[in-house]
Amino acid sequence: MNSVHQAKREIAGGRGNKGRGLLGWGGLRFYSVKSKPDERWRAGRAGRAVTEPASVSRRGATLLSLVVAAALVSAGCVSESSKAPAQEPKTNQSSDAAKDISMMLILYSEQPPSDLIERTLEEKTGTQLTLNWVPDNVYSDKQMSSFAAGRLPKVIQVKSVDLGKPTIVNAVRSGLFWEIGPYLKEFPHISKFMNRTIMDNGAYFGKYYGLYWELPMSRQGIQYRKDWLLNLGLQEPKTIEDLYRVLKAFTYEDPDRNGKHDTYGLVDRNDLVYGAFKNIASYFGTPNNWGLQDGALVPDFMTPEYREAMKFMKRLYNEKLINPDFSVISKIQQEERFAAGEAGMMISNLLASSTIERIKKLHPNAEVDILNRISGPTGDHIWGGTGLGGLYLFPKTSIKTEEELRSVLWFFDQLLTEDMNNLITYGIEGRHYVRTPDGAAKVTPDTRELREQETEDYNTAFRTFDIRYLKQGSINEMQQKIIRLIADNQMIVVHDPAAGLNPPTRAEKGAELGAIITEATYHFILGTIDEEGFTRQVEKWRASGGDQMIAEMNEAYQEAKRN
């Protein structure tokens, strides 16, 4: 490694500084903290997002306005991207500024990865990369600090949970980021593999400002104890009523055959989105966040189907078929209790491989299976996300010219070529994987630690669109079923027709308004309010800005349709 590259990594906080922390763009040092990448696109655009603390939001909005003003001044000499003439992408970057690409990336591991893949990427693309890895659990705060300091890299990852926050929406509206839509046709691999629906879900004001990294539209489903089902002589549930009967039997008919009344049918957690409730609401035909009635958008909780889902959950709670503390326990606690054999089912997602490993350690004879379809009054439905893990945005404060922007977009285009896609998906052939006789990539358990250190963070950071030139070989039966059912979900997925819409009231008050409905839903299920009480909370939502949000959402929806 040359001295320039070494110095660059020391500034950016690469693995060469293991144990010494991460130095960020704002001059603040962060130390790696264990965090998990699960559900990193949680509720981001739905209006029921994770709440941005008021103190941070107010401070960030004030500081951001100053940053945006400076950005607009510094970017004033740049022509409007919407008027950009079509040009061939510059694979032969003509200036040092164009060759240097700095990025702020989310770190899901305890330590930043080694620079092996980074150096390989540089060699293959002729670029100089400066990668600033920031731990997931502090990433959003660090991002805010970078905005406030006015020191942004050329590429910044914005998680889907943050895409609808006022700070980001206002930054886009004010011109802090490049509009990249007019340039994308110049890049053949981006144009070929880009999913237009996902791009539209990540658009602001009907325009494209970022490249997305992709998640499956829906990984939702049910994990259950198949051995308990067999012990009771039951079949896999197919309908909502079947589901109820299985949960009741798992609770009252001693499914683990230990002679004790010590099980629940369902173990759930304090999450109405990624826990059981939203899946169950889908079974009843509830819209996904927003639905269409007579061509107009309406919130999901103002539909009869939403109330039917609440009544079903209340039935489970009243009959003690669900853990009574579901409204306060975490995802980790939920999974631990399922693994311990306290319940026979989790209604959440299909990703059962790690669950099986944990259960087998405690109960070697246990069998876990998965399913994705439960038929309701109008057929089979499951809710889906936007397909967005988040967006890569391109600040005008750091990318001064169209030449530099094209250079950065060219780099992302190269990541979609066969050679580069294989590299960031599997690593280096012969070191991290081998090819099977039929041409698949075989990843063996003995390379697991090496892959964790050298490849997995790059896979998470740089696999934008979900494509694979090489298929993965040697995957077990459960992994094959997970892949198959996730693909099947595409056939029954319910999309959010309002994804990508960010009118002012939603951006500024969405989380606050969403909390009213979240609390009301929990209170109904727990029996502290009845239907009339829920209706009063909906009226409170409407009077607190909800009616204004509905009007603005419909106006934005109609405008998007016209465009």
Image (cartoon, grey):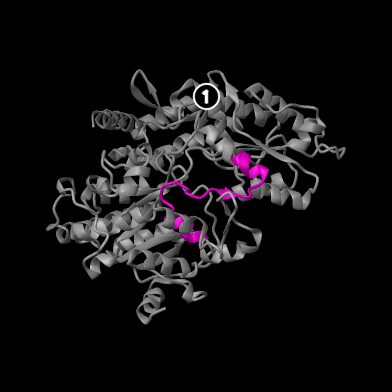
Q: Is residue 168 visible?
A: yes
Q: Tell me if residue 253 comes above or below residue 350 in the rendering.
A: above
Which quadrant: the N terminus? bottom left
Query: Mark 1 belongs to which amino acid?
Result: Arg
The percent coordinates of residue 149 (x first, y second) are 29, 65
Determine if the magenta segment contains residue 139.
Answer: no
Given residues 64 and 12, the one toward you in this image is 12
Q: Residues within 10 Å of mark 1 (few under 14, many from 20)?
A: many
Given residues 242 and 416, the one toward you in this image is 416
Give the labeled residue for mark 1: 307
Direction from residue 273 to residue 496 in the image, left or right: left
State the image quarter where residue 399 is shown: bottom left
Q: Tell me if residue 149 comes above or below residue 512 in the rendering.
A: below
The percent coordinates of residue 514 (x first, y second) are 43, 38
Q: Is residue 142 visible?
A: no
Q: Which residues are magenta?
A: 456-482
Given residues 176 and 409, the one toward you in this image is 409
Q: Secondary structure at mark 1?
A: helix
Q: Tell me if residue 95 comes above or below residue 317 in the rendering.
A: below
Given residues 191 and 366, the one toward you in this image is 191
Direction from residue 88 to residue 319 in the image, left or right: right
Residue extending farthest to the front is 437
Question: For the point 58% across and 37% down, which residue is it?
Answer: 484
Residue extending farthest to the right is 259
The percent coordinates of residue 454 (x first, y second) are 52, 66
The percent coordinates of residue 421 (x first, y second) are 44, 54
